[in-house]
Amino acid sequence: MDDYELAERAHALPGRFADRLDPADLATVQEYAEAGEWGEEVDLLLACLSAARRTVTAAERAELVALLQAMGMSAIRADELSAEAS
């Protein structure tokens, strides 16, 4: 994944998870995305999803893992998110 694709995918994350985030947390995640602070954005997103015990789809989990790996970050936290039953 090149830098442009990374930026594009990270920028889309807040909208993808908006229905599962508290409005204040969503606003902060969006601020990080718009500022290009993608590591902080994904870290906060994962923390919020975990704390609220929100589920993600297999595709969403794979997207988060791909982003984390592209940024050189550990994907363990994304792997630990609860998945929706198929």
Image (cartoon, rainbow, N blue to C red):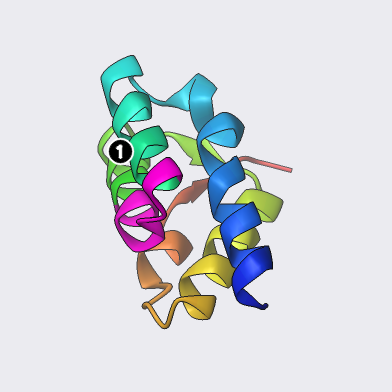
**Residue 28 at x, y = what percent?**
29, 33
**In this rendering, is residue 3 above or below 57?**
below
Tell me the SS state at disc 1.
Answer: helix
Residue 2 part of the magenta segment: no
Left or right, 1 with respect to 40, comes to: right
Specify the farthest residue to the bottom.
72
Q: Which residues are magenta?
A: 34-43
Q: What residue occupies the far right of the structure in this picture?
A: 86
38 vs 40, left or right, is: right
Image quadrant containing the C terminus: top right
Q: Residue at x 43, y 52 (%)?
A: 81
Residue 4: % across, % down:
65, 66
Q: Would residue 75 appear left or right of 9 to someone viewing this image?
A: left
- The residue drawn where x is 41% and y is 55% is 36
- Assign the N terminus to one quadrant of the image: bottom right
Residue name at image x 43 percent, y 73 percent: 75
Magenta: predominant secondary structure element? helix
Residue 7 sits in which quadrant? bottom right
Which of the pair 7/44 is nearer the observer?
7
Based on the picture, tell me whether residue 42 belongs to the magenta stretch: yes
Q: Position of residue 46 (x, y in %)?
A: 36, 50
Q: How many residues crowd mark 1 within 10 Å: few (<14), some (14–19), many (20+)?
A: some
In the image, what residue type sits under mark 1? Answer: Cys
Total tally of numbered discs in the picture: 1
Residue pointed to by mark 1: 48
Residue 43 falls in image quadrant: bottom left
Q: Residue 19: x percent and y percent?
A: 52, 20
Q: Is residue 23 above or below residue 85?
A: above
